[in-house]
Amino acid sequence: MRPWLPLISVAAAATIVWLGVETRRLAELAGGFEREAQLAQAQLARAHLTAVPAPATPAAAMAAAPAPAPVASTDQDPVAYAQMALELATTRSQLAAVTKLLEQRNAEAERRAAAVDRDNAANLQPVPEGVRRCLQSLQDCLREEGFTAYRFLGAARLDGEGLHEVELLDTAGAEFGATFLSAARMTASLDRASGRLELRFFDGHRTVAGVREAIGADGFPLVFAEVDGRAIEARLPYLVRAEGQYPEPVADDRRRPTDLDPISRRQWFDRFDRLLATAGTNPRWRLSRFRGLDRGDFLDVELVGADARNRVVAGAHCARMAVEVDARGVVSLWLRSGVLQNEGVESSINAEGYRMLLPNLTPKQATDAMLGMVVHK
């Protein structure tokens, strides 16, 4: 519903009330004039009957009957009466026109309200169970690969052409802005040889920093590199369309000793979620990605900071991060060798590090959440 419709309804209602009051006043005035005219005519008739004696016979009555006399004038001004009658008719016509306009406005408002109710009812429909499991599996696969900045909000159905009526929130923008994606269809393709997963969205729009952009005819792709294609293909066979052949394993695998397997990495994500949820930072920080673990340090870390309205306003990239407890019992995140961005301002983090205070945490809470993996200063 447009915001000016209630104002028009209020103004129309006020006009109807005024016209009603004015109509009633004019009607009362006209009635008074009519009553005065009727009373004057009745008095004139009584006076005429008293002055003329009744004849003895009908013939005598006819002979004695005087010629018709003009009706005596009264106090009523005919011009004023006619003007008042015209004003009354005009007021009634205006009242009818305003009433019709108000009825049209109300009918339009009711149609818009009904359309909004239909849209809301459609949005409140629960996600089908099969679609929900597909979205959950896809999001789990991305999270286990370290892509935690993508959250699927819903979808309507799943068939051979992909997911339909998909909504996605993306907080992994280069400037730490949030992007909302809404598309009529989404496909998922996997290149087995390179480990490249592509989610492509068709027939919809992207909203970036409040600016809405239509998705082109070729669709909009989200590309995730170096993923575990075998695991994704095994968990999402009904969605992912895979091409090519998986490379043969070689002795000098790119996997490093410090890398974590997907299950262990997910467990650490959950621990950091619990740790930072009650840390009392401003903005609220969340671990979005890390590669591995080396003697208490988390490697190749990405953090995202959000304000009270869940808007992404800050971020950090660093080579190493640890949870630190100093001699005074102060708990901090110790970031080293990277970049910190906060409200558009970028600053470097050197090898000595930058400490991000976690004011609401005690040493025991931090130690328990991290299973004892904290650094003591």
Image (cartoon, helix red, strand yellow):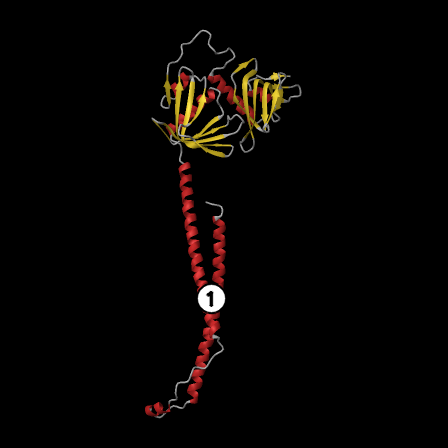
Residue at image x 47%, y 17%? 262
Residue at image x 45%, y 67%? 86
Query: Residue 249: horizontal and vertical position, in percent?
Result: 42, 9
Furthest-top residue in view?
A: 251
User: Is residue 32 among what the camera can see?
Assistant: no
- Amino acid at the residue labelled 1: Glu
Left or right of residue 350: residue 16: left
Furthest-right residue in view?
A: 328
Left or right of residue 241: residue 354: right
- Which of the two residues, 32 or 297, is positioned nearer the viewer here? 32
Query: Residue 137: horizontal and vertical position, in percent?
Result: 42, 23
Depicted 7 relative to depicted 302: above or below: below
User: Is residue 292 among what the camera can see?
Assistant: yes
Identify the secondary structure beneath mark 1. Answer: helix
Depicted 300 relative to depicted 21: above or below: above
Residue at image x 42%, y 59%? 96
Left or right of residue 54: residue 177: right
Query: Residue 51: horizontal and vertical position, in percent?
Result: 43, 89
Q: Mark 1 points at which residue?
A: 87
Residue at image x 45%, y 85%? 47
- Which of the two residues, 305 or 373, is positioned nearer the viewer here? 305
* The N terminus lies in quadrant: top left
Q: How crowded is mark 1: few (under 14 residues within 10 Å), some or many (20 or more)?
A: some
